[in-house]
Amino acid sequence: KNNGNSYLWQVPVAVKAEGLTVSKGKFEIPVLAPLEKKSITFDYFTKDKNKKIQGKLIIKVMEKQLLEQKINVIPLVYTSVIKIFAVLLGLSVLFLIYRLLTKMKHHDH
């Protein structure tokens, strides 16, 4: 965002990452009017797709650091395993409750 009261021309934006790879590291905004906001879009990814990685994203505009953000990248495999484990645990608990209830019914007779 241009918080000033004059136009900015050819505004350089640099995106760097530690521990991650950024699809496009340098941008140039041709013109930025007073109080105008611009968005940039980029992708980031890890070299090893099956590992949990913690990286850091750094964005600089006109050589001034605008953002420094830690990013945790968790592979889909991890989240899938956790969900499957949770479903199996839930089914096991339901089966245990069912078995206990049927045993209690048989003891009552």
Image (tube, rainbow, N blue to C red):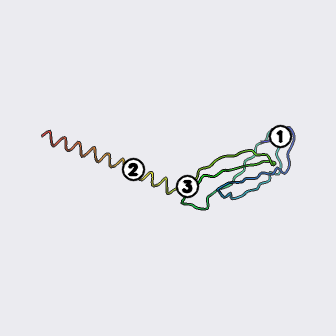
Residue under numbered circle 3: 52
Amino acid under disc 1? Pro
Q: Earlier in the sequence, mark 2 or mark 3?
A: 3
Nearer to the camera, 80 or 29 = 80
Q: Earlier in the sequence, mark 1 or mark 3?
A: 1
Labelled disc at residue 87: 2
Is 19 on the left-hand or right-hand side of 81? right
Q: Are marks 2 and 1 in contact (CB under 8 Å)?
A: no
Amino acid under disc 2? Val
Residue 45 position, x and y percent, is 62, 57
* Quadrant where the image shows the C terminus: top left
Amino acid under disc 3? Lys
Foreground mark, 1 or 3, reads 3
Mark 3 lies on a secondary structure that is loop
Nearer to the camera, 19 or 23 = 19
Distance (Cα) linking label 2 and label 1: 53 Å
Foreground mark, 2 or 1, reads 2
* Quadrant where the image shows the N terminus: top right
Mark 2 lies on a secondary structure that is helix
Labelled disc at residue 69: none
Residue under numbered circle 1: 34
Distance (Cα) linking label 1 and label 3: 42 Å
In percent of the image, x 49 and y 52: which residue is there? 79
Label 1 environment density (alpha carbons within 10 Å; few <14, some 14–19, many ≥20):
some
Residue 99 position, x and y percent, is 24, 46
Q: Is residue 72 above or below residue 21?
A: above
